[in-house]
Image (tube, grey):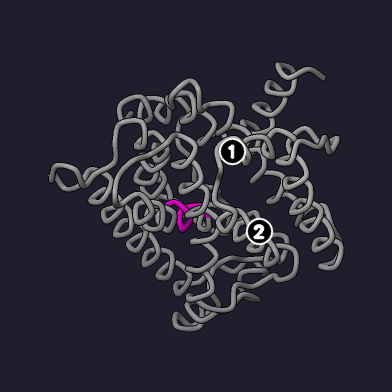
């Protein structure tokens, strides 16, 4: 497979696993697009390990393989895995943060080893290391400049991550997993076992409404830092803002989530054409 064929294959993986970020990538600087696709394909490969393994030890082995593979690829070695080779080259060429990548991989240990998010603090840390890290790494790839870049990644990652947690609820609950925090469920007189039985309680609906409010507040903070609140020199540059384009989809998804009648059986979605329009309008 030559370099052009590999790039096409990597783009295909990213689009299938993460269509929102993949479409947003089309509005990023041309020289950064393939690198962004490689990042999102890499994340997709990590995310699907939980569905590929039958026990935590096997998941840990695969995660370790990815740690070693991208480092080998960054050093110029061919691993034989097109995503590992593509992202390893990006890692080396862009001098991406090793700490963020390590955190992204380590966070997936939860995916392969646990079925219930124990508490809100752990959920926040998980979102920081996954959706937050993805925004931060994307910002590095496009060369984002601005003193609030990392803060936008953190707050934007929380907003975007909470949306993904709520949208994934019916799919994961059917498999006996949930990213809703157990302490938050208990605070609303419900529990993970109730979710796994497919029982939609009033407490669950109240918690989800609370989470939508938290996501909206995090989005507002991210936008404040993204544009610098009108203060010269504190917002991100134009190229840098393209790394955060997926944030424009948070509000439509929140609206869709608010209209879902049964959050354990319906996946909230938005019209693909509307999604494209939002991204074009926000670039």
Quadrant location of the N terminus in the rendered image? top right
Residue range corresponding to the magenta coloring: 160-164
**Residue closer to the observer: 223 or 165:** 223
**Disc 2 vs disc 1: Cβ atoms closer than 8 Å?**
no
- Where residue 259 sits: x, y (%)? 40, 50
Which disc number belongs to residue 18?
A: 1
Locate residue 273: give its quadrant: top left
For the point 24% across and 44% down, the residue is 235
Task: Provide the major secondary structure of the magenta segment.
Answer: helix
- Where residue 99 sits: x, y (%)? 57, 58
In the rendered view, tell whether residue 257 sits above or below residue 27: below
Is disc 2 surrounded by few (<14), some (14 to 19) or many (20+) residues within 10 Å? some
Which disc number belongs to residue 172?
A: 2
At numbered mark 2, what does the secondary structure look like: helix, strand or loop? helix
Magenta span contains residue 163: yes
Magenta span contains residue 21: no
- Where residue 280 sits: x, y (%)? 35, 24
**Residue closer to the observer: 134 or 118:** 134
């Amino acid at each position: 497979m030559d370099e052009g064929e590999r790039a096409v294959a990597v783009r295909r993986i990213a689009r299938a696993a993460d269509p929102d970020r993949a479409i947003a990538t089309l509005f990023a600087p041309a020289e950064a697009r393939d690198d962004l696709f490689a990042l999102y394909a890499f994340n997709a490969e990590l995310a699907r390990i939980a569905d590929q393994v039958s026990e935590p030890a096997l998941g840990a082995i695969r995660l370790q393989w990815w740690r070693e593979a991208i480092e080998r690829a960054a050093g110029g070695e061919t691993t034989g895995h097109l995503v590992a080779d593509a992202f390893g080259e990006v890692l080396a060429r862009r001098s991406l943060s090793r700490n963020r990548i390590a955190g992204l991989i380590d966070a997936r240990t939860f995916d392969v080893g646990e079925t219930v998010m124990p508490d809100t603090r752990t959920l926040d840390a998980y979102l920081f290391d996954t959706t937050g890290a993805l925004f931060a790494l994307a910002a590095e790839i496009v060369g984002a400049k601005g003193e609030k870049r990392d803060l936008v990644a953190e707050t934007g990652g929380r907003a975007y991550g909470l949306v993904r947690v709520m949208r994934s609820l019916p799919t994961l609950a059917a498999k006996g997993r949930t990213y809703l925090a157990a302490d938050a469920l208990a605070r609303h007189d419900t529990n993970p076992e109730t979710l796994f039985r497919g029982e939609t309680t009033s407490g669950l609906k109240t918690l989800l409404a609370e989470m939508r409010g938290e996501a909206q507040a995090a989005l507002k903070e991210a936008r404040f830092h993204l544009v610098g609140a009108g203060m010269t020199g504190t917002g991100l540059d134009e190229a840098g803002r393209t790394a955060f384009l997926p944030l424009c989809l948070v509000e439509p998804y929140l609206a869709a989530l608010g209209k879902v009648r049964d959050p354990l059986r319906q996946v909230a979605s938005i019209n693909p054409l509307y999604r494209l329009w939002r991204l074009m309008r926000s670039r």
